[in-house]
Structures are given as structure tokens and as C-alpha cells.
Amino acid sequence: MKSTYIVLAIAIPVMIASAWLLAAPGTILLSLSLGALLIALSAIDIATLRLPDALTFTVLLFGAIMVALTRPDLWLHHLLGAGIGYVALVGLELAYKRLRGRDGLGRGDAKLLGAIGMWVAWPGLAPVLLVASVSGLLGAVAASLFGKRSLSGETPMAFGPWIALGGWVVWLAAPHMALVPLD
């Protein structure tokens, strides 16, 4: 519990500063809303291994508002991002369960990637998953090395925080990476 407060004490100011410095013009309030929702979802997932649908849906809803206000001509790219993000992780979830005979990924992770896909559009999904996978792997290895958790294929681990981190990084970096034209 104490470590959660430490993480929040670091994450909140970093989120505010990075949004202030890197958010695309006209998106600061929406970016701060996204950041707050991603931090809340991450904290809940770490504590419960669950991602509440209400918060995930709010990420999706705010993403739709962002598209409507800042890039209405790119609806198709953002809707595809939401759909492909969700379907890709549901497919991975089902394939893993079929191959291994047990759950390996939660449906909440798929819903979160779909909601983030609304923000970053379909070209942003691969970078989100790259950041999420690499940071999640590094986090698991670090937790194992520092004695917080044993590292095995049976150890449950929240993936939502890493998807949230990937979504945040790509959302802020997208205007500088030209993933989707902004004009």
C-alpha cells in the first residue's frame, strides 16, 4: 500500500508536467483528463488485477470528444484504432487460453487498449504495445530482482498499468512522430 502512494506521488506530477510540455495544441485539458484516468486505472489494476469498465469507458468517451473537437476529419483512423486495439487483445487472450488452458490476459486489458486506440488512432497501436510490453517486462524483472515477486509463468501481473504508460507516451509523442496527420 505504501508503494502505491509513492508511485502516485511520482506519477501525478510527471503526468501534469508531461501534459503541459508535450500535449498537442488545444488538448491540454483532455490530456490531463486522460492522464488522471490512466493513473486511476493503473492504481486499481495493481491493487485488484481489474480494470473497471466505467473508467475504461470514460477513457473511450473522452477520446471520442477529443476527436470531435480537434480532428473530426480523422474519425475513421480513431475508430479503427479503438476497434483494432480491442479485437487484437481479445484474439491474443483467446489464443493464449486455448493454447495454455488458462487465462493469461484479462478482457479489461483489451478494453483499455481499445479505449487508448481511440486516442492514438490505429497507427499508434503498435507503439503503445511496444512501450507496454518492454516496460512491463522490465518492471517484472525489476520486481523479481528486488525480491518483490517471483518471476514465473504462473505469477499474475497487472498489464493495465503498462498499457496505460504506453498509451500516455504515444499520445504525447504522436504529434512529433507523425503517426496520424493532424491537419
Image: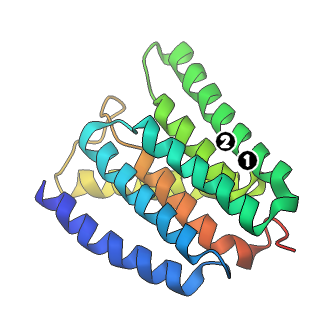
Q: Quadrant of the C terminus?
A: bottom right
Q: Give amino acid for label 1.
A: Gly
The residue drawn where x is 25% and y is 50% is 144
Viewer-nearest residue: 153 or 135: 135
**Horizontal relation, residue 54 to residue 91: left or right:** left
Residue beneath label 2, please?
85
Residue shown at the point (24%, 56%) measured from the top left:
145
Give the SS element for disc 1: helix
Task: Residue at 42%, 17% (x, y): give it.
Answer: 102
Q: CA distance from mark 2 to mark 1?
A: 6 Å
Query: Observer-nearest residue: 22 or 68?
Result: 68
> In the shown orientation, is residue 4 left or right of residue 29?
left
Residue at image x 35%, y 35%?
50
**Residue carrying label 1:** 81
Q: Position of residue 12 (x, y in %)?
A: 34, 72
Crowd band around label 2 with a 10 angstrom C-alpha radius: few (<14), some (14–19), many (20+): many
Q: Is residue 171 visible?
A: yes
Q: How many marks?
A: 2
Residue 142 is situated, as x and y percent measured from the top left of the image, at 30, 58
| Residue most extreme to the left | 2
